[in-house]
Image: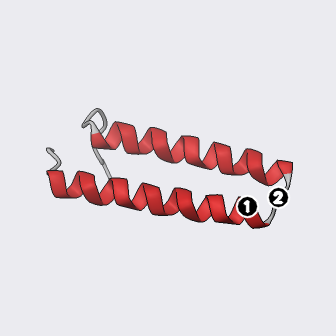
Amino acid sequence: MTTSRLDQAMAILAFIVFAGFLGILFGYVTRWDLGIMVGITLALCGWDFWHMGTGRKSDHH
């Protein structure tokens, strides 16, 4: 399955909005354990975005 440019742009926008939300959350609730969870969450989200966006993994649901 190929992804169009619009799908990729919307995925990038969604990732930026999600990262912004987590950044604001961490900015107002500054705890080290929340920072670790925000980092792990962004890493997993970015990894999934990379693999789905580059077509290396197809959605088999």
The crowd level at tag 1 (other Cα within 10 Å; few <14, some 14-19, many 20+) is few
Residue 6: image location, x then y, percent:
18, 58
Viewer-closest of 60 and 13: 13
Residue occupying the point 22% across, 56% down: 7
Q: Which residue is under mark 1?
A: 27
- 52 with respect to 17 (left or right): left
Residue occupying the point 83% across, 49% down: 33
- 31 with respect to 19 (left or right): right
Q: Calculate the distance from the C-alpha at mark 2 to the C-alpha at mark 1.
A: 6 Å
Which quarter of the rendered picture does the N terminus lie within? top left
Quadrant in the picture for residue 54: top left
Residue 36: image location, x then y, percent:
75, 45
- 18 with respect to 28 (left or right): left
Viewer-closest of 28 and 45: 28
Q: Which residue is under mark 2?
A: 30
Q: In this view, does 30 lie above or below 39?
A: below
Quadrant in the picture for residue 34: bottom right
Amino acid beneath label 2: Thr
Which quarter of the rendered picture does the C terminus lie within? bottom left
Residue 26: image location, x then y, percent:
73, 59
Q: Which residue lies furthest to the top in this view?
A: 56
Q: In this view, does 51 lie above or below 4?
A: above
| Element under disc 1 | helix
How many numbered tags mark residues here?
2
Residue occupying the point 31% across, 37% down: 57
Residue 60: mark in rendering: none
Mark 2–mark 1 contact, CB under 8 Å?
A: yes
Amino acid beneath label 1: Gly
The crowd level at tag 2 (other Cα within 10 Å; few <14, some 14-19, many 20+) is few
Residue 53: image location, x then y, percent:
29, 43
- Visual colour scheme: secondary structure
Quadrant in the picture for residue 13: bottom left
